[in-house]
Image: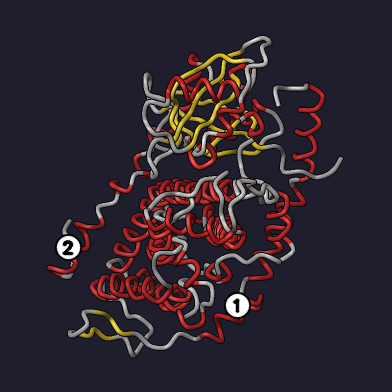
Amino acid sequence: MPDTQWPRFMVFQQMAPGEPLVHNGTVHAPDIEMALLNGRDVFVRRPRAHAMWVTPVECIFAKTAQELADGTWLAGVQDAGGAEEKYHVFGKLHHLGQLDQLGMVEAASAPMAMKRAIEGFGGKPVLVWWVFPAARTLYSDEAEAESLFQFSESHDFKNQAFYPVITMMRQMRAKGKLED
Amino acid sequence: MYGASVDDIKQDGKAEPERLAEFEARIARGEKIEPGDWMPAEYRKQLIRMISQHAHSEIVGMLPEGAWITRAPSLKRKLILLAKVQDEAGHGQYLYHAAETLGATREEMVEMLLTGAAKYSNIFNYPTLNWADIGTIGWLVDGAAIMNQTMLARCSYGPYSRAMVRICMEENFHKKQGQEQVILLSQGTPAQRRMMQDAITRWWWPTLMMFGPHDTDSPNTPTLVKWGIKTRTNDELRQDFVDQLAPDLMALGLTLPDPDLKYNEETGHWEFGSIDWDEFWRVVKGDGPMNAQRMAARRRAHDDGLWVRQALAAYAEKHGSLN
């Protein structure tokens, strides 16, 4: 068997119930279940998570505002019919931002899903669009949220505010020693 | 398909100079370039070089600190150090991801590191000889890295910028836990003070070298600045670092190993002596105190992990999961 670093999976994280999911990055994993666990280990060290989704990178269908600018791609998308399935829609709304969850569309292909996403959610300028099929996504189990994620919240020492170094330096500069 | 492929040439009929002018105008407006957008081949090449070196530095950077996890002086310091080293592994993952969006594969990047074709930060080729080195790495080495990374968080390539924002947030804990230790050890018992002074004496110059060669010897810098990858030069960042750290370390009664270090009232900056560039290039070229050990440790970890990668790949194949 050839050596490998395994396929890539895209990781999305929800910080608290009711908030949109946000794209985090990718992990490598041999399968999608390991991808969810690797995603937890890489991205939930802090500060918190309520839910996590993973999907294979090749399932992401992406278009940037630049690619869509002249309208030719969109005009060429044809509805070829066939069975429709659900697609998640994510978009990047700010230059300094991440991709956020915008919602869901139903379509028979990824390009059609993209077209419907742009029609349905394109009210504000979106810089990067992603659609991916819900059926190819693995979702963390709500019932397991506590065991998967909660422990990451309890480590005060990972918070920079745990270290009173500004006060300590002020004491050192003023008095040349630390107060008890 | 997410992530630009190297041969994915956009067929929009525009001439190269016209595309380049549009690209540079976007950067001038503060827009982020995203995978899928047009970019010059040189922009992609420079980013892959920088990001993969940065990722390798996070991975190799676990070794000098990891050596002290078992010998941490208290459970508190042990848990802090464990969390910090684990963060560095995570940072390596964020960065490899950013390079992958440009068409570099993980396999290629790992290969480049293990064969010595790719570089990582020189600082990790120095040994950690006593516990005070751990505080020093946190405050000085991570402090220097944060200055560079804060700049890169504003860089023009979206995925690199986002990885950096996340890393900077986490690195602030690394820096402050180190600073707290340096403050406490510098005010501790005579033995602790000696240990602290020894660490500062050994790490001060290598930390200044982390910012890289002088601007005059850094041929890539003008292009990197023009394309918004770097927004400040090596010498500017190095000066900021000395201005911040020198007075703080001196306020703790520590001595910096530079007889030429002095504050210039007129410029408002700290002046410092010449860096030993012969030492810098010697270590870059592989002849530092720990180069051989660091590479051996990475290769051993890779070889020892082979059976795990194969076993999990076999399991995934047998069970035919979603991927």
Residue at the spot 78% in from the left edge and 28% down from the top edge:
B315
* Residue ranking furthest to the top: A83
Distance of mark 2 from mark 1, alpha carbons? Answer: 37 Å
The one nearer the camera, A86 or B98, is A86
Assign the N terminus of chain A to one quadrant of the image. Answer: top right
Q: Are marks 2 and 1 on the same chain?
A: no
Query: Label 1: which residue?
Result: B283
Asked whether residue B56 appears in the rendered view, the answer is: no
- Residue B219 higher or lower than B14, as above or below: below
Q: Is A94 displayed left or right of B265 in the figure?
A: right
The one nearer the camera, B299 or B50, is B50
Residue A47, percent across and down? Answer: 39, 36
Residue A151, percent across and down? Answer: 44, 30
Residue at the spot 52% in from the left edge and 67% down from the top edge:
B128
Asked whether residue A135 appears in the rendered view, the answer is: yes
Assign the C terminus of chain A to one quadrant of the image. Answer: bottom left
The one nearer the camera, B22 or B108, is B22
Place residue A73 in its image quadrant: top right
- Residue B265 higher or lower than B61, as above or below: below
Disc number at residue B194?
none
Kind of residue sitting beneath label 2: Arg
Kind of residue sitting beneath label 1: Val
Dot 2 alpha-carbon crowd within 10 angstroms: few under 14, some 14 to 19, many 20 or more = some
Q: Chain of mark 1?
A: B
Disc number at residue A170?
2
Dot 1 alpha-carbon crowd within 10 angstroms: few under 14, some 14 to 19, many 20 or more = some
Q: Secondary structure at mark 2?
A: helix
